[in-house]
Image: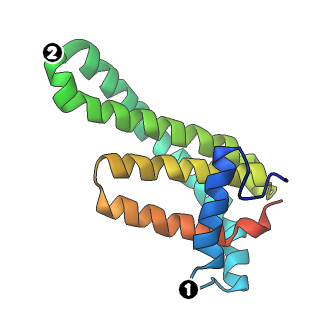
Amino acid sequence: MNSHSVGSKNPIQQLENLLTIYLVKKAPYTIPTKVREKIVSIAPWIDLILIITFLPILVVLCGLNFIAFNSFMPMGSYYMYGGGWGLTTIIACGSFILEIIAIPGLFKRKKYAWTLFMCSALLIIIKDLIFFSVGGILGGIIGLYILFQIKEYYT
C-alpha cells in the first residue's frame, strides 16, 4: 500500500486524502486551470508579504501574553481571560512557523511545502473552532478549498 492510499497510517496523509475527496474530487466547482496557475505563481509572494507584515504583530502578542501571564493576572483570571489569548498565541506561532518553513518550497513548488501550508491552515481552523469564530471557520474552509485545488502543482 503506498503513502497516498486511504489506508495510510500517517494521520496527516489520511486527512489530506479525505479532504482531497471532498475539496477536489467531489467539489461542485473546479477552479479553471489558468486561475489555478496564477494562484500558484503569486501565492508564495503574497504569503511572504503577509509573514513580513504580521511578524511585528506576533512579536507584540507574545510579549503582551508574557507580561499579562507573569505580572498582572491572578491565577483565577488566567483561566477566564488569559487562557484563550495564550492558546491563540501558541496556535498562531505554530502556524506562522510552519508558513515560514514552507516559503522556500512553495517557490519551488515542492509537495512538502504544500503539506506544511495545509497544516498551518488546519491549525488556524482548529483555533477558530475552539473560539467559535464562524467567519474564521468559513474563511478557513474557502482557503483549504483553494489550497486543495492547486495541490496538483506541487510535486
Within 10 Å of disc 2 (Cα), the crowding (few <14, some 14-19, many 20+) is few
Image height of 97 relative to 27, above or below: above
Q: Secondary structure at mark 1?
A: loop
Q: Tell me which label, 1 or 2, sits earlier in the chain.
A: 1
**Residue 114: percent from the left, percent from the top?**
70, 55
Q: Give the labeled residue for mark 1.
A: 28
Q: Is residue 86 left or right of residue 142?
A: left
Q: Is residue 91 left or right of residue 40?
A: left
**Residue 65: percent from the left, percent from the top?**
32, 26
Closer mark to the observer between disc 1 and disc 2:
1
What residue appears at the point 19 percent right and 31 percent down from the top-left corner? 81
What residue appears at the point 18 percent right and 15 percent down from the top-left corner? 75
Amino acid type assigned to the residue bearing label 1 in the image: Pro
Residue 106 at least partly seen: yes
The number of numbered discs placed on residues in the rendered structure image is 2
Q: Give the labeled residue for mark 2.
A: 74
